Amino acid sequence: MKPTIYATFLALAIAAGCSGYKAPTAVPPPPPPPPPPPATFTVFETLGDSVSIAAKLTEFRAALGGNLNAPNSPPADSGRREINWDGVPAALTDVDTFPANFFNVNSKRGALYSTPGTGLRVDSTDFAAVNAALAAQFRTFSAKKLFMPVGSNQVDITFRLVGTDTRGLVKGFGAVFVDVDRAGSTTIQYFDADDQLLATTTAPNHGSAQLLSFTGAVFEAPIVARVRITSGDAAFTATSTDITVAGTQDLVAMDDFVYGEPRPLGPDAQVTVGNDFFRSAQNGSQNPAVDTIAAGARITWTWSAAGSHSVQSTGIPPEVFRNSVIMSAAGSTYSVRLFKPGTYTYDCVVHGTAMTGRIVVK
């Protein structure tokens, strides 16, 4: 018998002898994870004169909620802070060295500034001191001072619990811009505590008229750790020329900033994953493990011993989060950060309702 024929008969014999064999049933993988719910926010924007801007700011302030908290007042549980630049001392005006921490140290309002450029400038000359050609370019919403970074058209604002080094989160942020000519040239990006982009708003642009623009966003809860403002196409220089006067770039200045009172981040929650239970590290509740966190806080599950478990969201959208894979090694961890208030339920894909938990986000 030829070897190839013999091999074929051998394979058939083995198959026949093993026809009653059944492979161990594998643990099914968790179902496809639901997409994490996006942060919910409301956009406020308008284009016009000072009256139009003031009306939109009234709406924006109402959406932020609470009162205007005065400079240097201690951290509050609600309300807003505002910066209009006009109270900046003369010694720090019309120079390229405005202190990045001025609005958390000198005039405490919980805002720190940074830029990829070379400095920051509060200007009382409509930037004519930078470039005489800009003298007729800009008007103000609240006279007389305007703001721009030096050597860049971008500035980042990170938030702190007012007057401290404690990271803060705000519910919303908005800004008044001067002379936005080109669509899309001026934006505000909103980032969470993990530096993930939450949203982007765009300042409306005008045609030939010299108008003011406002754009801002208000979220359901304080979840914004940083904003990045892109103000026009380019930095101001001694030779800058705006597109309205045959230039190639849209030059845009900034006026008032309005934002929610910075609130502290967290605290985060910890859950122990064992055989076969979820247990809250905060209060000892188990199956269900019940934890209450602030919007924007993180919850982390840690495997206390070897054993195959997963974290599977079982809620109804939008109260869902991304599932973990099945993990079995002691010390394994899985984390999610939840932004939308609500109640989020979960279980283990391997053990179902024998292992459950609940997260209440406020």
Image: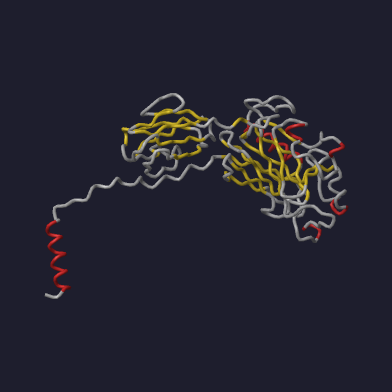
Quarter-of-image position of residue 307: top left
Quarter-of-image position of residue 262: top right
Q: What is the count of numbered marks?
A: 0
Q: Nearer the viewer, residue 266 or 315?
A: 266
Quarter-of-image position of residue 250: bottom right
Residue that appears at 65% across and 28% down = 79
Q: How is the image coloured?
A: secondary structure
Measuring from the top left, give residue 221's x and y in whole percent.
57, 33
Measuring from the top left, give residue 68's x and y in whole percent.
70, 28
Measuring from the top left, give residue 185's x and y in whole percent.
69, 53
Q: Nearer the viewer, residue 131 or 65?
A: 131
Measuring from the top left, give residue 158's x and y in whole percent.
66, 39
Question: 76 left or right of 122?
Answer: left
Image vertical order of residue 194 relative to residue 248, above or below? above
Q: Nearer the viewer, residue 228 or 201?
A: 228
Position of the N terminus by quadrant: bottom left
